[in-house]
Image (spheres, rainbow, N blue to C red):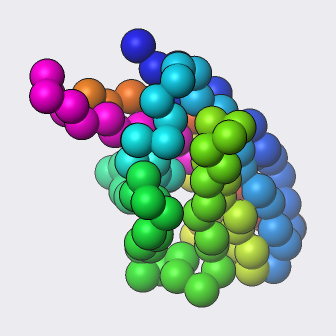
Amino acid sequence: QVQLVESGGGLVQPGGSLRLSCAASGSSFSTYKMAWYRQAPGKQRELVAAITSTGNPNYLDAVRGRFTISRNNAESTVYLQMNSLTPGDTAVYYCYAESTSWSGKFTYWGQGTQVTVSS
C-alpha cells in the first residue's frame, strides 16, 4: 500500500504562484508514474500533469507553459510548480501514483489539497 500526502495548497491572487508537494511512502517510488489531477466544483476530475518513472512530463493544454511537474526520487516526492495562476485554476488538486508489475497495475490517490485563486 502506498500513501500519498499532499501539501502546499492555499489562497493566492491571480498571477501568483504555488508549489504543491506530494510525499509517497514505500521503497519503489522511482518506478511509479506520478501525476496531478484537479477537480473544480461541479466539474469532472481532470489530469493536469504527469511524469513517467524516467522523468518525461506531459501537461493539460490549459496549463502547459505555466505549470511544471518534477520528481525527486531520493525524497520520494513529486512537485507541481504553478505559475501565472488564474481563477480557472481553482480546484482541489490530487496526487496520483501508478505502479505496474507482474501482478498488475495499482493506483493510489492522495487526500487532495485546495488551491484557490482569487483577489
**Residue 69 on the magenta span:** no
Up the image or down, 14 lies above or below 32; here it is below
Q: Which residues are magenta?
A: 93-105
Residue 80: name its quadrant: bottom right
Residue located farthest toward the bottom when viewing the structure as drawn? 65
Residue 20 is situated, as x and y percent measured from the top left of the image, at: 71, 50
Q: Is residue 85 left or right of residue 52?
A: right
- Dominant SS type (magenta): strand
Up the image or down, 94 lies above or below 102; here it is below
Residue 77: name its quadrant: top right
Residue 84 is situated, as x and y percent measured from the top left of the image, at: 75, 79
Residue at x-position 41% and y-position 41%? 31
Residue 88 is situated, as x and y percent measured from the top left of the image, at: 58, 70
Does any portion of residue 2 appear in the rendered image? yes
Q: Is residue 59 left or right of residue 119?
A: left
Residue 8 is situated, as x and y percent measured from the top left of the image, at: 78, 44
Residues 14 and 60: in front is 60
**Residue 102 on the magenta span:** yes
Residues 56 and 36: in front is 56
Residue at x-position 49% and y-position 42%? 30
Up the image or down, 84 lies above or below 79; here it is below
Q: Quadrant of the C terminus?
A: bottom right
Does any portion of residue 39 appear in the rendered image? no
Residue at x-position 24% and y-position 36%? 100
Q: Quadrant of the N terminus?
A: top left
